[in-house]
Image (spheres, rainbow, N blue to C red):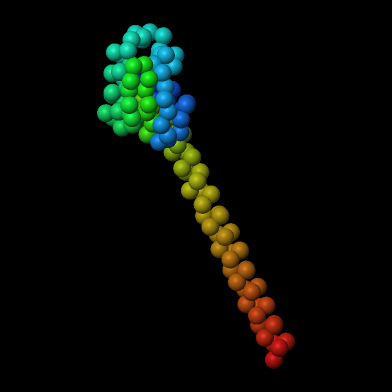
Amino acid sequence: MDKIACSVLDKFFSLSTNGKYVVVSADELFENFPSDAEFSERELKAAVDALVAEGYLDLKYRGGEMYCAAPLKKYTPPVEDCTLAEQAQPQAETAERKEKKPKTTLAVFFAAFAGGAAGSMLIVLLSALIA
């Protein structure tokens, strides 16, 4: 996805939530254009058409300088664009989660076991008092 399409998608997401239609003028979309881009209606139309074709926008209508569209999904850059340092960080977080999981699972087990034992003891005492 090129810079112009990303800027258009960012503008729609800043104005609306996922799936909600919003009417935006071409001037508002030009505000988000990169400084080195050509500010033309042709470039804007090509960017919107590309976003619709890729499933990022649902275009209800386009008339004059007005666009009515709903953002459908955010753009996530491909994995190969990430650096190795950024890829190593999620793996470290996953390892930390795996270490924490057995401790919490064991604590929940003992809490449930103690609650069950206390409840059983209460029933036994009540039945002994009644009988």
Q: Is residue 39 above or below residue 45?
A: above
Q: Foreground: 61 or 50? A: 61
Left or right: 96 with respect to 51? right
Look at 40% across and 36% down and name the residue there. Answer: 19
Determine if residue 80 is in view: no
Q: Is residue 30 left or right of residue 113?
A: left
Place residue 8 in its image quadrant.
Answer: top left
Give coordinates of residue 74: x percent, y percent.
39, 31
Q: Front-most of 83 and 27?
A: 27
Residue at the limit of the structure toward the bottom, as seen here: 131
Left or right of residue 115, residue 15 in this image: left
Quarter of the figure with residue 88 = top left
| Residue 112 position within the rendered picture, expressed as x and y whole percent measured from the top left | 58, 66
- Vertical order, 88 against 27 (above or below): below
What's the residue at 49%, 40% (across, down)?
93
Q: Quadrant of the C terminus?
A: bottom right
Residue 42 on image: x %, y %: 29, 13
Please say if 30 is above or below 123: above
Residue that appears at 67% across and 86% down: 127
Give the position of the N terminus as an image quadrant.
top left
Residue shown at the point (44%, 14%) measured from the top left:
31
